[in-house]
Image: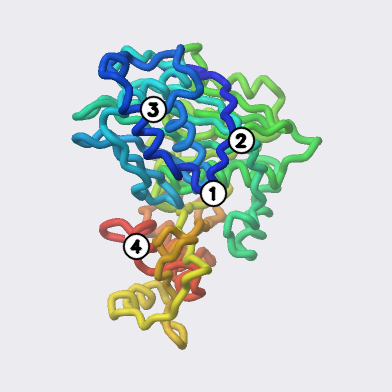
């Protein structure tokens, strides 16, 4: 069961950019309490000066400063391991004594209005905080694991504005073509990729491209990650009977011009979305698929008739997020044979002087990477590709035809970024390639 959570004002942290500085002293204060007090569950009566409260506050504050998308708090033997997911990769951030673990978990549960007594079942909740003049939504998930309870906090910065397409890392020519496809009055544009590939950001960026006072834009999402004043957003609430399918039916009675369906998960939602696109609405949605051709087949596999998919889908954009080389610690190097072979298979070569990598520095926390950019594959559904969809042609044939018509694959775009010194071959292999690709 999901809980709404509470809005919490967080006292300012004044320890410079490292909010975790001095946290050991606060932890020792906590451990110094007598055993009887430590064995009591930390509840809503805990005061804002309690060390455990400060520890939770400092962890969240530092996570926001470090641009973490998720914070993992995990029990391991006699220690509590804290990890941040930054730019798509987890990294160790902090070790806490195991004795503080139950208090930290209980404090987070209190903030998220979760049941602090229930330790066996997974729980989901939400916290709203104001941290350093930024409105932050935190999605909370707990799970019982060996050794205690694991908590994952997903940080959503509510102050973030709508991205424009040019800010997403799209090559100028691809961004121009995609923007043209977004300006069509009806049809369906699908964003494809695995979890964490940036689909939601691209969908919001797409809305930003067409958001004008003349249009009624409505969305159905799970969850609504970012709220925008000019867009009418509906939150999935299965307990109240609001699913993607029922919410989409409701939207169709609201005189929409543009409809965003956060994700096509089932045949009923897919069918309503396709029919909406065929009846004069412009529909944006996402599916879990590895590339553009696979996304089309996902709709077919859901039981949507070939001719309906061919008639409704106007474009598919597939994407991944890859880490960028840190600007502060870049160096040239001569790539090994395996990296040269990778570039060759994608139609690229090693530029004069070699490739670039990051050696690691304070700015990138020793990783050699700082921030991420998108890698995109755009397939416009032309008459030729429509015929292939109607015939339910194999994936390889659809992909081959799209490439013949000018589509650059994810692999080709990634190789271009390696050649340009934006990212590295190991990062491309980590983020894009799967077995058999």
Kindly report which numbered mark, 4 or 2, lies closer to the viewer in this rendering. 2
Kindly report which numbered mark, 4 or 3, lies closer to the viewer in this rendering. 3
Q: Residues within 10 Å of mark 4 (few under 14, many from 20)?
A: some
Q: Are marks 2 and 1 in contact (CB under 8 Å)?
A: no
Give the residue drawn at x 28%, y 26%: 149
Q: Are marks 4 and 2 in contact (CB under 8 Å)?
A: no
| Real-space Cα separation, disc 1 to disc 3, in angstroms | 27 Å
Q: Are marks 4 and 3 in contact (CB under 8 Å)?
A: no
Residue under label 1: 17
Query: Mark 1 or mark 3: which comes first in sequence?
Result: 1
Residue under label 2: 158
Q: Quadrant of the C terminus?
A: bottom left
Q: Provide residue 45's location: percent of width, then percent of height.
A: 45, 12
Query: For the residue labelled by badge 2, is the local secondary structure a helix, a strand or a loop?
Result: loop
Residue under label 3: 141
Query: Mark 4 or mark 2: which comes first in sequence?
Result: 2
Q: Identify the mark at residue 315; answer none if there is no mark.
A: none
Kindly report which numbered mark, 1 or 4, lies closer to the viewer in this rendering. 1
| Real-space Cα separation, disc 2 to disc 1, in angstroms | 21 Å
Query: Mark 2 or mark 3: which comes first in sequence?
Result: 3
Residue under label 4: 429
State whether residue 426 is above or below residue 60.
Answer: below
Q: Left or right: where does residue 48 sit relative to residue 91?
A: right
Give the residue drawn at x 54%, y 36%: 156
Q: Quadrant of residue 116?
A: top left
Q: Residues within 10 Å of mark 3 (few under 14, many from 20)?
A: many
Query: Mark 1 or mark 4: which comes first in sequence?
Result: 1
């Amino acid at each position: 069961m999901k809980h709404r959570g509470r809005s919490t004002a967080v006292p300012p942290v004044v320890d410079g950019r490292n909010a975790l500085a001095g946290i050991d002293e606060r932890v020792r204060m906590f451990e110094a309490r007598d055993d009887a007090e430590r064995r009591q569950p930390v509840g809503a009566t805990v005061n804002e000066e309690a060390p455990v409260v400060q520890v939770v506050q400092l962890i969240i504050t530092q996570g926001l400063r470090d641009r973490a998308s998720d914070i993992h708090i995990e029990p391991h033997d006699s220690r509590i391991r804290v990890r941040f997911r930054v730019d798509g990769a987890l990294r160790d951030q902090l070790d806490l004594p195991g004795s503080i673990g139950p208090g930290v978990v209980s404090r987070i549960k209190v903030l998220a209005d979760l049941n602090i007594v229930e330790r066996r079942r997974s729980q989901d909740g939400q916290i709203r905080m104001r941290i350093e003049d930024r409105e932050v939504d935190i999605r909370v998930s707990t799970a019982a694991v060996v050794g205690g309870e694991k908590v994952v906090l997903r940080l959503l910065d509510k102050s973030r504005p709508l991205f424009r397409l040019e800010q997403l890392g799209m090559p100028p020519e691809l961004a121009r073509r995609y923007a043209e496809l977004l300006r069509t009055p009806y049809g369906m544009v699908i964003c494809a990729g695995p979890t964490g590939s940036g689909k939601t950001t691209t969908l919001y960026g797409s809305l930003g491209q067409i958001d004008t006072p003349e249009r009624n834009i409505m969305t159905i999402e799970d969850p609504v990650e970012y709220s925008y004043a000019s867009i009418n957003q509906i939150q999935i609430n299965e307990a109240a009977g609001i699913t993607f399918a029922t919410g989409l039916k409701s939207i169709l009675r609201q005189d929409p011009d543009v409809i965003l369906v956060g994700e096509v998960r089932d045949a009923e939602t897919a069918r309503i979305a396709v029919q909406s696109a065929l009846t004069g609405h412009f529909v944006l949605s996402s599916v879990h698929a590895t590339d553009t051709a696979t996304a089309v087949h996902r709709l077919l596999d859901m039981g949507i008739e070939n001719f309906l998919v061919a008639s409704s889908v106007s474009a598919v954009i597939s994407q991944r997020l890859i880490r960028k080389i840190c600007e502060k610690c870049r160096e040239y190097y001569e790539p090994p044979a395996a990296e040269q072979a990778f570039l060759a298979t994608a139609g690229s070569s090693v530029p004069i002087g070699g490739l670039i990598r990051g050696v690691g520095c304070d700015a990138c926390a020793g990783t050699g990477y700082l921030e991420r950019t998108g890698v995109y594959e755009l397939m416009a559904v032309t008459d030729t590709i429509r015929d292939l969809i109607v015939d339910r042609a194999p994936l390889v044939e659809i992909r081959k035809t799209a490439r013949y018509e000018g589509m650059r694959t994810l692999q080709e775009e990634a190789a271009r970024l390696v050649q340009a010194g934006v990212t590295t071959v190991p990062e491309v292999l980590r983020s894009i390639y799967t077995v058999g690709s």
